[in-house]
Image (cartoon, rainbow, N blue to C red):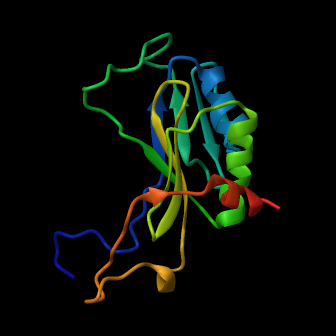
Amino acid sequence: MPQDLLPPQTRVGHIHLKVSDLERAIAFYSGVLGFQITQRFGQDAVFLSAGGYHHHIGLNTWESLGATPPPPGHTGLYHSAFLLPDRAALAAVLKRIMAAGIALEGAADHGVSEALYLRDPDQNGVELYRDRPKAEWPRDAYGALAMHNKRLDLDLLLAAAG
């Protein structure tokens, strides 16, 4: 492996977001998406995770209490993406999103994955997705990956929730 490349085992450990209202952000990330609070730092910050990890998400108001989202056309986070273990888990979170009355910005079948796109209360983009097994990934005639962007059938996905 070349000296200047990260090892292939490297993973994104967590995201840390500036939010304007901590309780509102917790209601979204914990109450709707299902992340568990692992630690609070007074009234200013919180860590959340899935499965007991120390934290996948950090939320804070240290520099952003009461702030507005950046306007369109500016740099910043496009979206954070959360990989769910299977289709049933993706369907279950879709049910919670719908029950909370949160609108989806999109739902796509990329061939390699199925993804839901929405915004958190501070207008940060959020992607929730599940990967298909590598053996099912679409390939072209030469064996190269051939991802696509087709409409995801939400009714069919919801049926997977059981």
Q: Nearer the viewer, residue 99 or 38?
A: 99
Query: Would residue 1 appear left or right of 91 to someone viewing this image?
Result: left
Q: Nearer the viewer, residue 36 or 54?
A: 36
Examine the image and state in which quarter residue 32 appears: top right
Whether residue 104 is visible here, answered yes or no, is yes
Q: Nearer the viewer, residue 116 or 64?
A: 116
Q: Nearer the viewer, residue 58 or 29?
A: 29
Query: Would residue 155 appear left or right of 133 to someone viewing this image?
Result: right
Residue at (64% x, 53% y) in the render: 154
Q: Give the quadrant of the N terminus.
A: bottom left
Whether residue 51 is visible here, answered yes or no, is no
Query: Would residue 136 appear left or right of 101 to someone viewing this image?
Result: left
Q: Residue 127's x, y, as percent?
A: 50, 48
Residue at (74% x, 46% y) in the render: 95
Number of dots carrying numbers: 0
On screen, residue 153 above or below 64 = below
Q: Residue 53's x, y, as percent?
A: 63, 55
Q: Give the quadrant of the C terminus.
A: bottom right
On screen, residue 11 above or below 136 = above
Query: Would residue 104 appear left or right of 146 to someone viewing this image?
Result: right
Q: Residue 156's x, y, as percent?
A: 68, 61
Q: Residue 58's x, y, as percent?
A: 53, 37
On screen, residue 78 above or below 84 = above
Residue at (67% x, 59% y) in the render: 157
Q: Residue furthest bottom?
A: 142
Q: Residue furthest top?
A: 66
